[in-house]
Image (cartoon, rainbow, N blue to C red):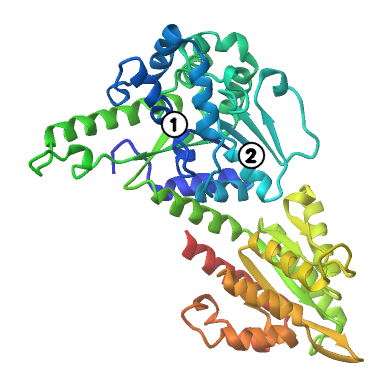
Amino acid sequence: MSSEAISISRFEKDILNELKNNNLNVFAGAGLSRGSGFVDWKGLLRDIAEEIGLDIDKEHDLVSVAQYYVNKNGRHSINEAIVNEFQQTAKRNKNLDILTRLPISTYWTTNYDSMIEDTLYSIGKIADVKKEKSQVKLYKPNRDAVVYKMHGDKDHPKDAVITRDDYESYSKKREPFITKLKGELLSNMFLFIGFSFEDPNLEQILSKIRVDLIEEQDSPKNHYCFFRKVSPKDDYYKLKNGEYDNESYQYDLIKQELKIKDLKRYGIQTVLIDDYEEITDILKRIEDKFKMNNVFISGSAEAYGDFTEEQASNLLHSLSAELVEKGYHITSGFGLGVGSYVINGALEMGNQKHLKTDDYLTLRPFPQKASGHKNLEELWKNYREDILDNNGITIFVFGNKLSDGKVVDAGGVMREFELAEERNLYIIPIGSTGYASKEILDIVSKDNDKYWYLQDSISFLKASTDNDALIREINTIIQKIQKRAI
């Protein structure tokens, strides 16, 4: 690893902390959209450059290439290139899928495509897209995320920022974007992804922020970016005789190190990776770790087995209160005989700590009557999948219902267990509460490898009806899980 780069573990820890504080922004460059089949700037301008006698692979100042073309032939062909290249049907983008599932409410991009907003829409999030300066101050009701398209959009190619003229007039024509971005960079952490830091707009904004901070004797906010390590075995360095150009490699290695150090002036820390596919693995780990802060309490109870109703209500109330106190976010399906006590405990602790309810509690009551085109079973299946996709730990309690006058195991709780297993969630069944939870504990106790975190607790979870002791044991199990994740 470069002496100037940040370790992946440090990066993941910092990103998780900002996610928990709703303080992470994403800045997407062309590299992110390449994963969906779109071209980068070189690809976009390749034919344009050839038409005026230039080799795009020899050019580094692509803004000037675009300007040279406009000077000679006008803007029309560049506008057509933007429309033709970015109107194609895009492939799913794994990195964007992960980022949009995370609680990130602000995205910035210099890309012309609509990948960010389309991905947000595909998972049911409302995107407030800002393509021109008049939209920056407007607020779309009920939005889940805002997308600032600094360089315009494929649907309005004549207004896209691409030539030297566009950059020189940017501060006048798109001044609200600059003001907003400066404020965000000072207050929030940014993850720059798919970005080369060759864009003159961003460089000017970062420089201005740095000057302001120096005058105020303040330090910049920490931000992060990914760089792929230059490797002596890259095809780029391979010579015709099969050997590798070590001199060019050493030169690029020095240049990369200097670039990484220079970015620190703006508070941008670099994470070095061996291959761009590694970014997906890192983001997925971050998502999995983040979801471990989200606990779904699954259960229903017409009867309470070896517990009295008072004991059961105290257990559920105290358990949810303890989880909230320790900073976990609880999801409840409002199961009969369980949900109300879970909610009461969470609310009581949330009020004591002066927390906003949405920050520690999500209520997902199940629909009880079918309507529309889907039957109730199909609705419940989709609903359960959505709940479990957003949680990392599932605690099972009781799990019974009344059927034909008899108390039987709740099939819905068992289906939630099956879905949790499919998603490799951490499963904690309190078997002593009986019914479906006992059955689930019997199943997981047979797989020591998968449920390693339960092995020292199986006997206790089967037998104990001591509320305080059960809560302590669940805390111990969750701590094991968290330590392994770190």
At label 2, counting other C-alpha atoms closer than 10 Å, the crowd grade (few under 14, some 14-19, many 20 or more) is some
Q: Nearer the viewer, residue 286 or 91?
A: 91
Q: Which residue is mark 2?
A: 117
**Cα distance, mark 2 to mark 1?**
25 Å
Which residue extends farthest right?
405
Which residue extends farthest left?
241
The amino acid type found where label 2 is placed reads: Glu
Total of numbered circles in the picture?
2
* Picture coordinates of residue 121, whole percent (x, y): 68, 45
Q: Is residue 17 in sight in this rendering?
A: yes
Q: Which residue is mark 1?
A: 268
The amino acid type found where label 1 is placed reads: Ile
Relative vertical location of residue 141 with respect to residue 307 in this rendering, above or below:
above
Relative vertical location of residue 369 with respect to residue 29 in this rendering, above or below:
below
In the picture, the quarter occupied by the N terminus is top left
Q: Residue at x 61, y 15 (%)?
A: 174
For numbered disc 1, what is the local secondary structure? strand
Left or right relative to 343: residue 237: left
Relative vertical location of residue 465 with respect to residue 91 in this rendering, above or below:
below
At label 1, counting other C-alpha atoms closer than 10 Å, the crowd grade (few under 14, some 14-19, many 20 or more) is many
